[in-house]
Each structure stands twice: as C-alpha cells, then as structure tokens.
Image (cartoon, rainbow, N blue to C red):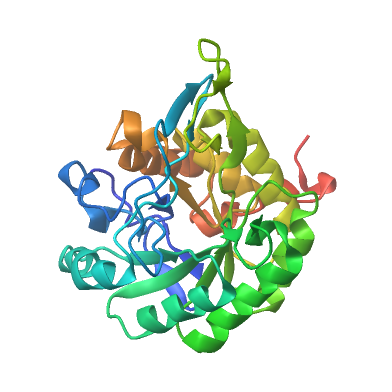
Amino acid sequence: MNHDFQSFDFRCKFGAKYFPYPIFTASGCASSGKELAQFIDLREIGAVVTKSVMSKPRHGRATPRMAETPSGMINSIGLQGPGIDQFLAHDLPWLVSQKARVIVSIAGETVEEYATLARKVRSAPGISALEVNISCPNVENRGLVFACDPDASRRVIDGVRKTLGGELPIIAKLSPDVTDLVSIAKGVVDAGADGLALINTVLSMVINLDTMRPHLGGKTGGLSGPAIRPIAVRAIYQVHEALPAVPILGMGGVASGRDALELILAGAKGVSVGTASFADPAAIITIQNELKDLLKARGFTSVAQAVGYAHRPAEDIEK
C-alpha cells in the first residue's frame, strides 16, 4: 500500500456489504478489469464494477462510436459484450482469482430479461453486489429508457429483488436525463434497491461539419468526463437530501481527489472513476490517495463522517 490507511476508516457500506475503500471503477470503463490490472492492484480499490452485461452477446452500435468534446467525451458503444453465460464462465472467475471485490452490472431490454440475469447471477460465487443499469431502452414500450419511466424503473427493480432474495445488495443506476430524479429514486428504493448509482452519462450528440450529419454511428451517445461533474453533484445532493439513509455510489467527471470529495460532501458514500482512467489507468489509486489526504486535512477520521457534510445546518458552519 502506498499510503497508510490503518489510522483512517476508509470503509463504505452498501446494503449489508462493507467495502474497505470508497473508490470504485465505473461500469463500462474497465470492462472486467483485466486491462486495468496491468497498472493497479485490484484489491486496493473498493470494487471493480463490471461493464453492463446482457443475456446474449452483443456487437454494439455502428461506428464511429466515440467523439471528443470540450472537457469530456461521448460514447455510443451500445453495451457490446460477451453475454451473461460467457461472463460467468470466464470473466467473473478471473476477477475472483485476483481477489477483487466485484459488483456485477446487468442491463436488459425487458423487465423479464433483468430478472433472468439476476437468476443467473444469484448463485455465482464472489459477487459483492449487483448494479442494475436501467438506462436502457425498453423494447416493450416504444424504446423508452427504463430509467426515464418511473413505473418501468420500479418494475425492473421489483423483479430483480424478488428473484435475488434479500442477500445481495442491489444498486440501481439512474439516468440524469429526467425532470424529477428524486421521484424515480424513491420508486426504485421502495421496490427493493439498497443503493443508487448517480449519475449515468448524459444523452448528447455531435454534428460532423464536413458531412453535416451526426458524427456517431448511433447518432446519440452518452457524455462523460469533467463536463458532467456539476450535474452529478446536483443530482447526488438532491437525492441525498430526500433519501439521506440510502447509500449513493457517485460518479460523473471525477478526475481528482478534490472531485471525489465534492461528490462525497454532496451525499455519496462511494465514488466511481471512469473517463479519467482512459488518460491515466492508475488514476483511481491517485484519486483515492488524494481523497484520504484531503479528508484528514479537514479533520475527518473516516470517510463516513464526510458523507453529506454539505447538508449540515447553516448554524453548524463556523463563521
């Protein structure tokens, strides 16, 4: 370990599961961790959150799939992946062999597909929690994204919870592309989610000025990177204010310890790092070390003490 964490309580908790560190990978940015493991020890972070996996293998969307933007990037990859059977047979055992803590992210096109995925994951060894990525089009409702539909969001989480039983924590990953994020958050918590992942990427588009047509093969994509961090801070703050007992895994443009601390002060218990890892694969460790130093410098003895600290009453703030 580069930094001494022994005198500082860095743990965070989702459902009944404790994680020894508060910094996680972001789903989709480290696949199943093999590439990242060349640069960092996967045991030294909170958990590897896998790329969202679906029932069957997917080739993803047409190219081009990426576009750089000021302070960010747009991806239109389209959940390309091996499918759940291949994942459970090959990717998960490798992660377990590395002694990494694993949060498996699942995605589906129907309520039933999510339940089927939960059924397959339920008996797999070495999983710490399940992220349910509901930012996917619902093929049974004209392609409306589940996370933008309060009723569909609840039905997905309800189906997953009934399938899983009560042991494995469920973290519902929500989209910022809604007008009332708090009501959707309340709905999925009522349906059985133990925690929330905020925020997913922001729906975006780039026009190619040479062709004068949408640049991405899929036309739209998800904006990530520093450009969306203020949106993430706002979303986390609002949801924590409404649901202070519900743990939040915060994400969106985190590139430094200061960024991570901002999300924690807003109400996140843990923080995921995604886009920053493309420029620096070891960024997640750097951010984690910076976060610890920042917390200690401000007099905190645990990360839990800082969660939601920005919400304290005005009279508690020293003049």
Q: How many marks?
A: 0
Where residue 235 sits: x, y (%)? Answer: 69, 47
For the question of whether residue 78 can be seen, the reply is: yes
The residue under the point 39% across, 62% down is 53
For the question of whether residue 1 can be seen, the reply is: no
The residue under the point 76% across, 42% down is 317
Left or right of 238? Residue 95 is: left
140 lies above or below 61: below
Image quadrant holding the C terminus, namely top right
Using the image as rendered, state which of residue 122 and residue 96 is in the foreground.
Answer: 122
Hey, which quadrant is residue 141 in on the image?
bottom right
Where residue 304 sits: x, y (%)? Answer: 54, 59
Where residue 97 sits: x, y (%)? Answer: 15, 67
68 lies above or below 140: above
Where residue 221 sits: x, y (%)? Answer: 54, 38
The residue under the point 67% across, 68% down is 153
224 lies above or below 50: above
Hey, which quadrant is residue 159 in on the image?
bottom right
Left or right of 42? Residue 47 is: right
Query: What is the residue that sits farthest to the top in this orientation?
Result: 210
The residue under the point 51% across, 41% down is 260
